[in-house]
Image (cartoon, rainbow, N blue to C red):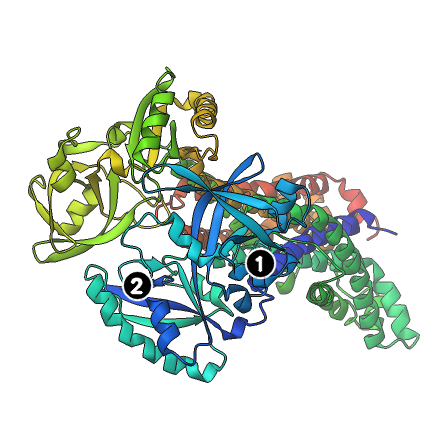
Amino acid sequence: MKNKLFILINVFGMGIAIACCVTAYLNWQYSDDWDKGHVNADKIYRVQFWREFQGKRDRYGIAPMALAGYIKQNFKDVSKTVRYMTSYCDMRIGDEVFGDQMVFADSAFFDLFTFELKYGSFESFHDKGKVFISDKVAKKYFNKEDVVGKPLTQIVLGSDGVRRPKEFIIGGVFKKLPLNSSFGFDVITLFDNFWDINLDKDLTETTWKRWSHVLWLKIDDPSKVAGITKQLQQYVEPQNKAREDFKIGEYFLQNFAGMMRSNRSQPRLDSDYLGGSIPDEAVTVPAIMAAMLLLLACFNFTNTSIAISSRRLKEIGIRKVMGGMRVQLVIQFLAENLILCFLGLVAGLLMAEWLVPTYDSLWPWLELNLSYSDNAGFLLFLAALLFITAIIAGSYPSFYITSFEPVSILKGKAKFGGTNWFTRILLGGQFVISLVSIIMGVAFYKNGNYQRDYDLGFATHGVISAWVNNEGAFNTYRDALASNQDIQVIAGTRHHVPFNFYNDPIKYGSLEREVDIMEVGDNYFEAMDMTLLSGRKFIKDSETDRRESVIVTEELVKQFGWKDNPVGKRLVWMDTVQLYVIGVAKNVFARALWQPIGPLMIRYVAPVKYQQLVVKTQPAKMKSVNQFMEKKWKEVFPNTLYSGRMVDEQLSETNEINENVTVMFGFLGFFAALMTGIGLFTLVSLNIEKKMKEIGVRKVLGASIGNIAGVINFEFVINLGIATVIGGALGYLFSDFLMHAIWTYYLKLNYASLTLSILAMIAIAVGAVGYKTFSTASLNPTKTLRDE
């Protein structure tokens, strides 16, 4: 076979594109299968509500705790009601202590949702003394799955600050659901057990002031949903009377089928205590990337097929003279392309064996499985992909090549070679896709550096926090750590940035704003390197400061429109509590860079409210200090799992996304540029073949190498120029769109990065055609004119 290298390269390029398509399909299927397998999904509804505040309309996934009882008593069309709460708990099995989210649900939970129970009976879930665990936990701690009847100890923190054991008997072992599920728990027990760990005195079964994390309803007749929704509105008033500072607008019911897609649409669901969802961008971006690579591979296939087929014109002419029909030739060429595409498919599936797990490892919430035996949809996708690829890549060459008349072919009058409008469009498309890919890679790389060094208003290195949950544990642990000379500051706090705060409205005069609120203790400002711009810090042990003093951030000052000195301003919280500003702190990005910065109000709390201990050290000492903290933890709290977390880990998601997206677009950019270079080399070769006589004549007449290079490449330079403008604009818009969808604060693509990307594309183009152009321009003209 001739042209083996070109064919091999194109099959390899097609294989890469198909491997990316396979990965993108599995990624989409993983998202589409979210919560799949629950038999009653179309009958299960989650109670949610809308809230309007200051012109903003938000939806929440929580429900008042008291609401469940009223629904049970008064809603005859609701067959089952299930409250669902989740809480981190320390547990012990034998000598092994582990910490995990424990779920507390009403007894009808397993009647609503479909779980595979491997051992035990669902009837046991009605027993308050029983607990159900996943097969994963059973294997990990018992080294077997059938552990029904075995003990499990929960370590319960009492209101007096003492941790006491609470014994359970394992009543069932269920198969753990996959990651694309709203339920990622490993331990679940009856809802009545929740009251044994509840330390909030205001949280009772009949309160309207506190929330159930989720309230599920089973409605057997879908036609009753509208009536039930209307009936729910009578309970808006009692909730709003109990929480005048947090008034809801209306309740609505969200069907469990398709709930994940609804939750991730805008506005995103607030207070969602379930397993979350996949962002739309995480599904669409890989699909777009795969489609771009597939188009590139098809473009290359088309151009290469035309180039290779130029040597088959005589074969086509003779077959037509011998009575061959054009349709037969078209079918032959399509079949040949189909075979090559099939080889590309085989290559792609082999590459997918590496690419799928590699992509899966980039994202902790993914669990992709490349399986052929139990995925009929995937097999249909592969068949459709093969057919579409063969049609896109082979149609034009097949119809174009077979369109020549046999007389003109055999007389040598058929002009074949060079480029036309179609091949120019294909090449321009390759340039655009490659440039967009390079721009995206550069943009995310630059943004990663920008966000890594972004000033969030607090220390992003050298800080370790651990949950202690009460004053007594804080004092014990603080004293145990005091001997370490590498620890610079030890602070106590109720809340801790990032992400740990609550939100409430406050008033200044007639203005009302919803603000983030943090309650901190002694030394917290020093531990977190927070900057005070004016005023003073809290005075240690000052009851006045604990009762009425607050420190606010620049954003809060801005939102209230204070032009004069903010110190001394009076704020009203919860309608009756009067607070006075004693200082203004530099803005704190409590939500990191994901969402707009919120106004923050910081209060001073007594040690009795401490929940976390925060340690500051040198960044280089963090590992050794963390090991020391874990060692001391095990000494003073042997029945509780060490919960220390470095602030770097809490902020790592931003860096991981930047790094992973940079890798993705770097991968796309590299192979897109490679295939574009190959496609350009092929078209230049075609153009040279067409202009060999002209080149020879020009050489005889004394044309320089530069002049001949211009003759060969002029139209490609024009093509590249147009593609640079289009690709540059698309790359800028696409990178800005994607970053804006992920973050609020990011680095917009600048002219330097755009220019760098364009120069890289030009360098690839020059590299692709330079050698071929120079070698042709340097040929002895007698060799090009000998046959004339």
Q: Is residue 73 above or below residue 394?
A: below
Q: Is residue 59 above or below residue 513?
A: below
Residue that appears at 55% across and 63% down:
35
Q: Residues within 10 Å of mark 1 (few under 14, many from 20)?
A: some
Q: Is residue 362 above or below residue 342?
A: above
Q: Residues within 10 Å of mark 2 (few under 14, many from 20)?
A: some
Describe residue 28's horizontal placement relative to residue 584 as left or right. right
x and y percentages locating residue 214 in the rendered image: 41, 61
Give whichever of 547, 352 is nearer the camera.
Answer: 547
How many discs appear? 2
Describe residue 91's horizontal placement relative to residue 597 as left or right. right
Residue that appears at 26% across and 27% down:
526
Specify the amino acid type for callout 2: Thr
The residue wearing badge 1 is 287
Q: Secondary structure at mark 2?
A: loop
**Which mark is on residue 716?**
none
Q: Secondary structure at mark 1?
A: helix
**Residue positioned most to the right:** 322
x and y percentages locating residue 94 in the rendered image: 58, 37
Give whichever of 681, 353 is nearer the camera.
Answer: 353
Specify the amino acid type for callout 1: Ala
Give whichever of 243, 668 is nearer the camera.
Answer: 243
- Residue 604 seen by the camera: yes
**Which mark is on residue 206?**
2
